[in-house]
Amino acid sequence: MNQMVLALVLFAVMYALLLKFSEQRWIIALGGAAVFLVLGILPVGDALGAINWNVLMMLTGTMAIVELFIRSGMPQRMAEGLLRVVPDVRWAVVALSLFSGLISAFVDNVATVLMVAPVGLAVAKQIKTNPVPVIIAIAVSSNLQGAATLVGDTTSILLAGYAGMSFNDFFFFRGRLGIFFAVEAGALLTVPVLLWLFRAEKGRRVTPGRLTEVKDYVPTALLAGTVLLLIAASQFENKPELTNGIICMALAVIGVAYEALRGAGGASLVRSVAKAIDYKTLLLLTGLFMVIQGLTSAGVIDAVAQGFVQVGGSSKALMYGMIVAVSVALSAFIDNIPYVATMLPVVGSISGMLGVEPYLLAFGLLIGATLGGNITPIGASANIAGIGILQKEGYTVATKDFLRIGVPFTLIAAASGALVIWLAWA
């Protein structure tokens, strides 16, 4: 068995284990990296260089800042203020969905659901309606707009690291519309879908109670500062490789230090922030970075790319459609983080074989992989978090209840988003 076949077999086994044992994904990924190192598929000298430290630092810093933002109560205050201006329950659901999408463009999807879902539950209880579709709408909207900006989702950070994209590049890149506008086009076209799905609630008023009091605006300023500094850093072409990671980490340290010094819990605050950091995802990515480098070294990435080209031929349109469709289908059942991390080098290789820029296929990959997770309850972490909140409240979420919202939502958003990317980049 040559090294390429061995690497592919080992990766297939590792991926199957990732799907089977979701709670141990980080252990499996690190174990796979260790096997690659022991067998010489990944040279030991290349191991540390394969890890994208900028991505890991950005994730760690933003997770800490988001925890402070949630603790401040600002997200709840913003959502409650939004509800005061809507005419009925239908528009309340649309407003909460769009609001969760807006927050999710700058905050992790799961954190967004944890912030906005309690407001959705309160509204549903107040008007005595079933909260299940309300929370599902919030979850799928959070998952949708995570791909809009560099800091919105792990997959966006992976794309930025692979393509060398800055914060601004998600809006306008190389003189063309960025992925932000494709995501927003999809989000806007889901509004009529939500209005139709919640048509039975037409005319029922929403009367929100007292607004949540926000006593600390520093976390909000830190989150805004993170975005602004990332924008500023994007203006410099020759900045150090770890610039974005350093910005996120530095602001997180400043935020924790400030909150601790002002007497906001001290040691308990530090523990809370430390607990909010998803170490398992960070370790999962660490292992995946090394495994993917091993696959590249063994020639697997180029071989998979050649397989795509053999099926799609030299047709750029067919290849783009294949990547979007396959990504939507697979992401409905598998986590999009390892999928995107694996496929980015593949689409890069495919682009080289077709003689086209890699951005068209890379953006199509992200559109399909991010939105495809909305089809099923297990396709995205945000969906799982939303269902968990409902289960804690005593509600049962049937698969058909999720599909009723997830399928039309995904098809409309993915198709429109993919079309915008095609028109801008093809």
Image (cartoon, grey):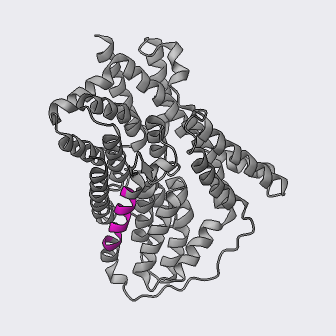
Magenta residues, start to end: 182-193
Q: Is residue 183 magenta?
A: yes
Q: Main secondary structure of the magenta part?
A: helix
**On screen, 53 above or below 295?**
below
x%, y% of residue 69? 65, 59
**On screen, 161 above or below 408?**
above
Q: Is residue 24 magenta?
A: no
Furthest toward the front, the residue is: 175
**On screen, 208 above or below 414?**
below
Q: Is residue 222 left or right of residue 13?
A: right
Q: Could one spot residue 276 in this view of the protein?
A: no
x%, y% of residue 37? 47, 15
Q: Is residue 187 left or right of residue 100?
A: left
x%, y% of residue 223? 64, 56
Q: Is residue 40 left or right of residue 354?
A: right
Q: Which quadrant would residue 58 be assigned to in this image?
A: top right
At horizontal 74% and vertical 65% (from top left) the residue drawn is 216
Q: Quadrant of the N terminus?
A: top left
Q: Could one spot residue 294 in this view of the protein?
A: yes
x%, y% of residue 243? 62, 38
Near-viewer residue (306 or 280): 306
Near-viewer residue (174 or 130): 174
